[in-house]
Image (cartoon, coloured by chain):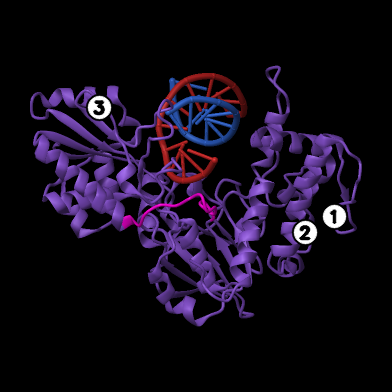
Chain colours: A purple, B blue, C red
Amino acid sequence: MTDAGLYEFEYGDCESSGLLHDENGFPSFQDNDDDDDDDEEEEEKEESFADDFYRCGTDWSCLLQTERKLKQANLFDMWGLKSNSESEANCLFSPPMKKLKASNGKSTATHLKKIVDRSCPFYKKIPGTPFTVDAFRYGSIKGCSAYFLTHFHYDHYGGLGKRWSHGPIYCSPLTARLVRMCLLVNPSYIHPLELNTEHVIDGVKVTLLEANHCPGAALIHFRLQDGQCYLHTGDFRASRLMQSYPLLVNHRVNVLYLDTTYCNPKYKFPSKEDVLNYVVRVTKNCLKKQPKTLVVVGAYSIGKESVFLAISKALGVKIYANASRRRVLQSFDWPELSGNLCTQGNDTLLHVLPMSSLKFETLKDYLKPYGNQYAAVLAFRPTGWTYSETVGNQLDLIRPLSRGNITIYGKISKARINIFSGVPYSEHSSFTELREFVQFLRPDKIIPTVNVWNAASREKMQSFFREWLSCKKLMI
DNA sequence: GCGATCAGAT
DNA sequence: CACATCTGATCGC
């Protein structure tokens, strides 16, 4: 639905040139009382995006003044607009458009979306600096002389590879190792920055702080020469510990670029600690009933290592992972992890497998080569959110799915949509954690970095921000 | 034939 | 519903 709407929106605007521009090239909106339903919806989207831009954006003037010519390109980027002849000339933030070739009979809307996605969204650029954050999939970004990477997840490093040549990359030392190892980026571009240390880059004081997300993930604190402070959270899970970071206690943050993944009260989940205790409890129970159980933890690239580390610690068993994953895990340089990895699957009952393997059929096949070493499988799929509203904070309501001797916590079942729940081990902030963090920091402005492409969710988030910042006391 | 990129699936 | 890929198709060379 949303996507279809977006397509139409982009397509419609590009084709019908329904937008008016003011003398600066900014879209201008006229109150239009025509009662055409479809048009109205489009108008709403445009208006709230514009509202967001002017009302809750930072003082964008610094961006506009330092790079006057970027104004229009910027704005076009925001709206996902490329208007014919104009766009080529003003397209300062994106590589030249690719020529379209409608090889099949498909609508050009698909092609338009491709182009639109090629330009760097405004919220990835840090105003008043030549910096971008997590913006590698837009080619060479005009005016950008330092590319920051918050953490090593695909949706943030996408575009980085051995052919990267658009400028220096700044990130944490752990992330730097992964970028070099896994993506084969030329090391001369990679600039590791120690956490909790002030680095001066292009005259801006930059400090990386632990983000409580995946290994190597960092919050980035920028202090400009004019005294403005910006905090970019990348992806993070807000924690009480952060309220003691000296930089956050001692300096006012003017603009907060916020990971708003779960910025909605419907997202409730337990603390990491509670989930780890739960997983350990379930595992112990299972092993008590069936000592010959293989315990499997699903994982993507990096993140959620604590789930298998907790089991390893509690049971005193080693962790098996295949060679490529071991290489990545070793690169973290965490003694408690490196020291507990093993290279043979039959050396331990605790295995880490790709998330895609956590299916009944695949696990059954996986078990075969181990003969009668194992009589059952217990698998955990740590997901961000519990999926079921009824579960929320109550871990005891989680029900696994079983087939034969295989039990999966977090197997998605359409049939049991309302009672199923994964293991809600989240590396993003819950709604209440976000609120507490924002009310601690009390920034002048907040720029959400997730769920921004939908007008309704943007509007909703902004109203939460207003609410949080308008009241003096913490609410519970 | 190959890597890069894309839409769609999971 | 959303995360963080993964898969399979297509593109460009």
Q: Is residue A330 visible?
A: no
Does residue A355 lie above or below A88 as drawn? Answer: above
Q: CA distance from mark 1 to mark 2?
A: 8 Å
Residue farthest toward the bottom in the current orientation of the protein: A250
- Residue A158 or residue A36, whichever sits in front: A36
User: Position of A141 compared to C1: left or right?
Assistant: right
Label 1: how many residues lie within 10 Å, few (<14), some (14-19) or many (20+)?
A: some
Disc 2 marks which amino acid? Lys
Q: CA distance from mark 2 to mark 3?
A: 54 Å
A262 drawn magenta: yes
Foreground disc of the pair 2, 3:
3
Disc 3 marks which amino acid? Leu
Q: Secondary structure at mark 3?
A: helix
Residue at (78% x, 46% y) in the render: A44
- Residue contact between numbered discs 2 and 3, judged by CB atoms under 8 Å: no
The lab-note entry on whether marks 2 and 3 share a chain reads yes
Does residue A288 lie above or below A458 as drawn? Answer: above
Disc 1 marks which amino acid? Gly
**Which contiguous range is marked in magenta?**
A260-272
On the image, the x and y values in percent for residue A233 come to: 50, 62
Image quarter of the N terminus of chain A: top right
Q: CA distance from mark 3 to mark 1?
A: 57 Å
- Residue contact between numbered discs 1 and 2, judged by CB atoms under 8 Å: yes
Residue at (40% x, 69% y) in the render: A240
Q: Which residue is mark 2?
A: A71
Foreground disc of the pair 3, 1:
3
Q: Main secondary structure of the magenta part?
A: loop
User: Position of A181 compared to A345: left or right?
Assistant: right
- Residue A105 or residue A182, whichever sits in front: A105
Q: Chain of mark 1?
A: A
Q: Which residue is mark 3?
A: A363
Residue A25 circle label: 1
